[in-house]
Amino acid sequence: MPNPKRRHSKRRTSIRRAHDALVRPPQSECPNCHERKIPHRACPKCGYYKGREVLEIKEAT
C-alpha cells in the first residue's frame, strides 16, 4: 500500500476542509399552522403533511 512520504501542510489541509462546514437544512412554511418546517416532511407542530394529518400530536399539559 502506498503511503505519503511527507505530511500535508496546514494550508493544504485547510483548503481541503473548506467545504466541510455544516449548513442549516432549508425551511418552508407549513400551510396548516404557518410554522417553519423542513420541506417534504410532516410538520412537527401540527402533524399535517399535504393537507392531511399523518402524525398524532399530543397537547402539552
Image (cartoon, grey):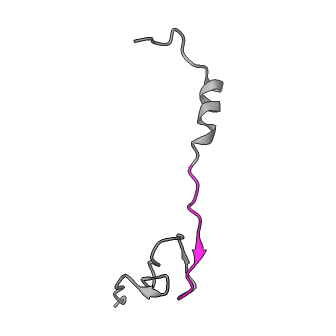
| Residue drawn where x is 56% and y is 50% of the image | 22
Image coords of residue 14 (percent x, y):
62, 31
- To which quarter of the image does residue 29 belong? bottom right
Report the side of 28 relative to 49 (left or right): right
Magenta-drawn segment: 22-33
* Residue furthest top as drawn: 5
Taking depth in this image into account, of 54 and 57 the one nearest to the observer is 54
> Of 59 and 40, which appears nearest the observer?
40
**Quarter occupied by residue 12:** top right
Q: Position of residue 48 (x, y in %)?
A: 45, 84
Q: Name the image quarter holding the C terminus.
A: bottom left
Residue at position x 42%, y 83% in the image: 47
25 inside magenta stretch: yes
In the image, residue 26 above or below residue 60: above
Count numbered badges in the picture: 0
Residue 20 pos. (x, y %):
57, 42
Above/below status of 7 relative to 28:
above
Q: Residue 54: say if magenta.
A: no
- Can you say which quadrant of the picture contains the N terminus? top left
Q: Nearer the viewer, residue 45 or 53?
A: 53
> Left of 60 or right of it: where is 10?
right
Residue 7 x %, y %: 54, 15
- Residue at 59 percent across and 64 percent down: it is 26
Could you tell whether 41 is left or right of 16 in the image? left
What secondary structure predominates along the stretch shown in magenta? loop
